[in-house]
Image: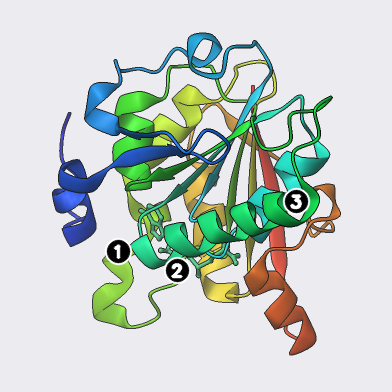
Amino acid sequence: MRENPDYNDLYYQNTTTYSQIIDIVTKRVVPLSELAAPIDWVAFFGNAYPVEIEIGFGKGRFLLEASKRHPRVNYIGVERARKYVELTRERFEKHIRHFGVDRASGTFSNVRLAWTDANYFVTRYVPSSSVQAYHIYFPDPWPKKRQRKRRIFRNQDFLAALTATLKSDGGRLYIATDYKAYFAEIQERLSQVNPLRLVADNLGPDRDIATNFEMKYTLEGREIYRAIYERF
Ligand SMILES: C[S@@+](CC[C@H](N)C(=O)[O-])C[C@H]1O[C@@H](n2cnc3c(N)ncnc32)[C@H](O)[C@@H]1O
């Protein structure tokens, strides 16, 4: 795999040393390196439900709500910051302590936390044409000029892998940001990615679930920019 010269990210370089996947219900933690790549989703989840991946889940609000409300969708949350992985895991565990695991739906047996770099995960572990939806909400905007090369949407290998791993018959990429200039850049870059097309912009949050950043920015009265792309 060609390394992207504009993406000299320390996290990515260190990724292999810590990457792991956490099953919240069984508490099993598996180093990513022990999984055969690409991951066979049916064997991994034990069912053939569609797979959705949230990249950079932060404090995990979307992941928790979406996986709870949609037990017949498998969710993988990818986050590289250890403190957010731990915080989100605690959040799920707290929810289970308070509300238990619903036997019928097996609450949260459909979700895994992947502590790793999204580019590393998507390019190596996600099979082609296998993902029903990616959710990328409030990606770090890296506003300083010298840091902009870190923007995840600037990484061509990542964009190519995102597209190739979406289901070819309508797999979707959901995006939200409060950063207007970055939103324009994302739209510009994605307009050049084939086979991906813009299907909607400026709707409400997907499934009506706001992320932590969305809640905070909405309270502050900031405008939120959103788009949905679809692989065709
Ligand atoms: C601005 S926060 C948004 C968090 C959450 N999506 C929300 O809306 O509340 C961006 C998150 O993406 C994570 N992140 C950034 N780049 C990443 C990457 N390459 N792989 C995995 N996570 C990443 C950061 O650690 C951070 O938690």
Residue in the foreground of this view, choosing between 94 and 177: 94
Q: Nearer the viewer, mark 3 or mark 2?
A: 3
For the rendered model, the colour scheme is: rainbow
Of labels 2 and 1, earlier in sequence is 2
**Would you say the beta carbon of the disc 1 residue lies within 8 angstroms of ligand 1?**
no
**Would you say the beta carbon of the disc 2 residue lies within 8 angstroms of ligand 1?**
yes
Label 3 and label 1: CA atoms lie apart by: 29 Å
Report the side of 192 relative to 59 (left or right).
left
Identify residue for label 1: 150
| Quadrant for the C terminus in the image | top right
Q: At label 1, which amino acid type do we have?
A: Arg
In the displayed structure, 140 sits above or below 57; it is below
At x 60%, y 53%, the residue is: 93
In the displayed structure, 210 sits above or below 124; it is below
Q: Indicate the position of residue 128 as horizontal and vertical percent values.
A: 45, 17
Report the side of 170 relative to 93 (left or right).
right
Identify residue for label 3: 65
Q: Residues within 10 Å of mark 2 (few under 14, many from 20)?
A: some
At x 58%, y 32%, the residue is: 196
Please give the count of numbered marks on the rendered protein: 3
In the image, which disc is placed on residue 140? 2
In the displayed structure, 121 sits above or below 185; it is above
